[in-house]
Image: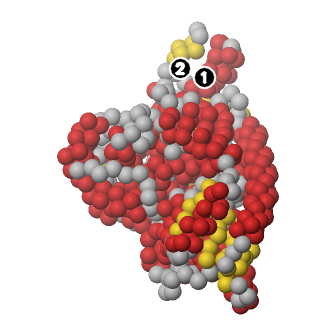
Amino acid sequence: MIQKRFEELRYCGNLPSSSGVGLAILRLTQRDEQPLDDLSAVLRFDPALTGKLMRLANLARAAGATPVGSVEVALRRLGASTVRNAALGFTLLPAGRSAACGHFDHDAFWSYGIACALAAEAIATEGRVVDSGRVADPGVAVDPGEAFTCGLLSRIGMLALATVHAETYDRVLAGARGRAPELLLLDELRHFDIQHWEVSAAMLAEWSLPDSFVGAVMSLGQPKRDPGLEDPASEPLAQVLRSATLVAHRLLDGVATQGALGEGWLDLLGPVGGGLIDHDRLVALCARVAPAWRAWCERLRLPTATLGEDEIESRAIADDGLDVTLDGLLAPDSAVEEVVNAAVMLATSELRVLVVDDDPRLLRLLEHHLSTAGYDVKTATDGRSALEIVGERPPHILVTDWLMPGMNGGDLVRALRSTEAGQQVYTLILTSRDEDDQIVAAFDAGADDFVAKPYNPRVLLARVAAGHRMVELQRQVRVDRERRSMQVAEMGLLTRKLHSAAHTDVLTELPNRRYAMKRLEQEWTYAEQMDRPLSVLVVDVDHFKLVNDRHGHDVGDEVLRSTAGVLRARSRRADVVCRLGGEEFLVINVNSDSFGASMCAERLRRSVEENVIRARAFEGRVTISLGLSTRGEGVATVHELLKAADEAVYAAKAAGRNAVRRSPRCLPESA
């Protein structure tokens, strides 16, 4: 499989956080002594901020150091100041962008991520995962912190598509209702030349998270693949993630039954299959995870359900053995209509104004004047209440008194200006007349304008109208920026399609020789840096010329396509299968020594031999000869590695074909 990248996100802004996370961050960062532990607890439940922190931590790590895989480790490495700045950089979802991808339920996505993260952490903590009746090797432990992070980020590719390609992805999701999940993946591939699983994996790789994360996430994209073909380094985490996915779906099903997500919520993930965990374990894990999941969702104002043990067990019984999908992230039709209508109202209504004052009489007077002028007015009696309103739905204009108990106007403005969302709010301070020090302090805090008290209503409305004009200018700037972002996103998509076309063999749809050579160079460099093994297999179809001569080139093409399919299906997920040309293929065995490569070669030889090919007048089998070589075993460069494998395949043919041979340069074969 070609390594795909999701370049669009790098140039098109940040992923959004939930408003509940933003509000929690605003509250915590206003304390005199900022509690980093409390702030960290909130950050670890937000996929967007977690991804940002993991990326920063891995960028800062020393060369050759182990990639950071847990939020806790990332926070320790980054320090309080960096963590605080990253936290305050959260991005809230603008109403217009939400409407653009109205069929994607953002709240359900965030709720699901928390459930999956908590379930993965609980499973890893127990150290025992049952996968299709198999008990994981107890000697292979999964770090609970890494399991949590992987669970939280496992579906982040869907959020990225809904953010960067909002309008197109909305159409894709709208067409996904009631259809087989495989068709959704095909639609994603047709529109974006990448599937959401691949987007997630590409983003994790971009953030330099451990390779096991990438392999575990990709395992969800091909759930019916033979588990024995997983990379041993990622299989334990993949088992944890698959089981956590099942638990998260059972919990989120409670939300769906209450009408929050609509029917058919399971159609999006693609089957991960029942039987990953047995019934008793499923019930126990749901009961264990549900209280923490419910508590955090309520704290972050995300949808949840109050499920009793009997309900959890009944759902587990009802769903036991069924395929699990992810339609829970599809907003119901009624919710889509509501979001779109809200966006239309926002575009045609007057601006939202938030008025904050601890004097009830003055507050009513301000509300009266502004409402009469046609503004949509909200009120708050103190700074902390105002922050809650801002966290839920930021106003366009803030009118606040300067002197208030608790959080005064200056503190409120500073809190807003410290966040990306708050920087878009036009702020107007009410100060005492002739108090120059207050006016200067207000501007120092970040205010845009001021009105002296007692205020003249005409002057107040004139100042607000000036703010209205400024807000409109900012809105136009954002529209232009979004338009440019969409153009960049389209360029990223076009680049990916061109890259894929340039590196894909048209006949077999495998990566071609150009990609094979480039990828092999990359894997060689990485293997040298990380001091890990690397092997290659050169594969040649036996007597292929006779097939062409006797049955024609069209049958020969079918033989190559069928053989390529077997090679791809029976290779490990981490391996790279390419077509070099003619009847010759190359398999790059990533992180595999000569013993592992020999096992892979024998598995491929046997699978091809057993594969019955039916093509027009031809029905039969073909065989392959394979030669393998390994880095460090008599070879010191990529060129020597390929040459050694090529020599070995000639040796296999000389031995009678349908055989596997190691390079003569390598160490002697063991008996």
Give the x, y percent position of residue 149.
47, 62
Q: Nearer the viewer, residue 62 or 522?
A: 62
Amino acid marked by disc 2: Ile
Q: Which residue is mark 1?
A: 559
Residue 647 is at least partly visible in this image: no
Give the x, y percent position of residue 179.
49, 27
Q: Residue at x 68, y 27 (%)?
A: 507
Q: Could you tell which of marks 1 and 2 lies nearer the N-terminus?
A: 1
Dot 1 lies on which element? helix
The mark total stands at 2
Residue 229 is at least partly visible in this image: yes
Look at the image and tell me in which quarter the N terminus lies: top right
Mark 1–mark 2 distance (CA, rounded to whole Å): 7 Å
Is the residue marked by circle 2 packed among few (<14), some (14-19), or many (20+) residues within 10 Å? some
Q: Nearer the viewer, residue 452 or 103?
A: 452
Q: Residue at x 57, y 50 (%)?
A: 159
Q: Is residue 412 left or right of residue 137?
A: right
Is the residue marked by circle 1 packed among few (<14), some (14-19), or many (20+) residues within 10 Å? many
Q: Nearer the viewer, residue 117 or 447?
A: 447
Give the x, y percent position of residue 661.
55, 43
Q: Which residue is mark 2?
A: 613
Protein image colouring: secondary structure
Q: Residue at x 40, y 58 (%)?
A: 297
Return the residue found at the far top. Answer: 617
On residue 289, the disc is none
Q: Is residue 467 left or right of residue 213?
A: right
Amino acid marked by disc 1: Val
Determine whether label 1 and label 2 are within 8 Å by CB: yes
